[in-house]
Amino acid sequence: MTTLFNFGRAIGHDFKREQTAEDLRLEVANFKLAGTGGFLSIVKYLCFAILGSLNFHLFYSHLPGIWGVGLGAVAILFECCTIYFWNSQNWSAGSHQRALQAFAVIFTVASFVHGSAALYQLAGVGPSLHLPLEIYSKFLAFPLLFGLMVLAVCVLHYVHWQTRISEAQAETQLRAARSRAELITEAVDLENKAQIETERLHFLEKKLVLEEQYVSVIEKFVAIKSRGQRALDRIEDPDVRREINAALGRTTTELPAPRRIAPLPSSIPAAVGDNDPK
């Protein structure tokens, strides 16, 4: 009996542990963090709707007519941009997220200041701000609101991740185009060098042909001169050889033949006197 009792108690403990673990899993699965939707979204849109109405009333009451309606529409567009910034900053990261948060705060502060001024005018408490608000609405409101929206669009476009990807792609294409240009330039340079070397080779070939022709002509010249020299050598008379050399324009070192010296005139009478009888 004791063994059966212990066995049943062990089974009960195992069942309780499994039930506790299942309860923990269900608790973890059903646990949810506080979000930005639901009631908070309703409050957010309601607050910005009130601020938009106050902004429109501020500009329309100080600038009646079409200009006041237009400036009020710009103020409502300003509120829409503010809502977009607050909604989008949770779905971004890095510099784009920081820019969204910064513009969301700046736009909210500007909208709150305009709404407070409008509410102050509607309540009628304190000194009147009609003149300063009229000057602000006529000369400063539109440049401020429109300029902030244009600045936000430009900055957000610049820091967007797609812009970074486009810049990286453009940089890659630029490097590829530069590499292709350098390759084409190098190929043209090598082609020019090859053409120059080919022309130099043709020049050397022509030069060799000319030198071969020179050698052939020299050999012919030497053969002719040798034949002429042998012909001259066969002439025994030196005077004839000199005349032929002079006719051919040659210079010769051959010495002329020695001439016979005639007897002196004084020796003749002496000989005659010896034979003359006295």
Image (cartoon, rainbow, N blue to C red):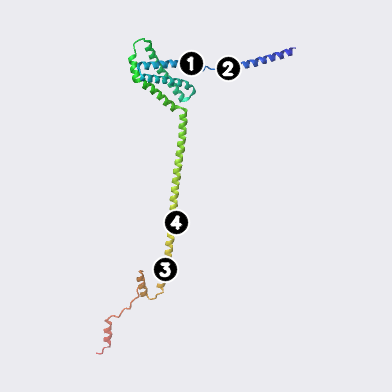
Based on the displayed image, in which of its 4 quarters is residue 185 positioned? top left
Measure how far apart labels 3 and 1 are at the Cα level: 124 Å
Measure how far apart labels 4 and 3 are at the Cα level: 29 Å
Residue occupying the point 69% across, 15% down: 11
Q: Which of marks 2 and 4 is nearer the N terminus?
A: 2
> Among all residues in the image, which is located at the extreme front?
65
Amino acid carrying label 2: it is Asn
Q: In this view, does 248 lie above or below 4?
A: below
Q: Name the residue under label 1.
A: 42
Residue occupying the point 41% across, 72% down: 231
Kindly report which numbered mark, 1 or 2, lies closer to the viewer in this rendering: 1
Q: Earlier in the sequence, mark 2 or mark 3?
A: 2
Q: Which of marks 4 and 3 is nearer the N terminus?
A: 4
Q: Can residue 205 be seen in this view?
A: yes
Disc 2 vs disc 4: Cβ atoms closer than 8 Å?
no
Q: Mark 3 points at which residue?
A: 224
Measure how far apart labels 2 and 4 are at the Cα level: 95 Å
Q: Which of 102 and 56 is in front in this view?
A: 56
Locate residue 200, reporting x and y percent.
Answer: 43, 53
Mark 4 element type: helix
Q: Nearer the viewer, residue 7 or 145?
A: 145
Q: Name the residue under label 4.
A: 205
Q: Is residue 51 left or right of residue 8?
A: left
Q: Quadrant of the N terminus?
A: top right
Q: Mark 2 points at which residue?
A: 30
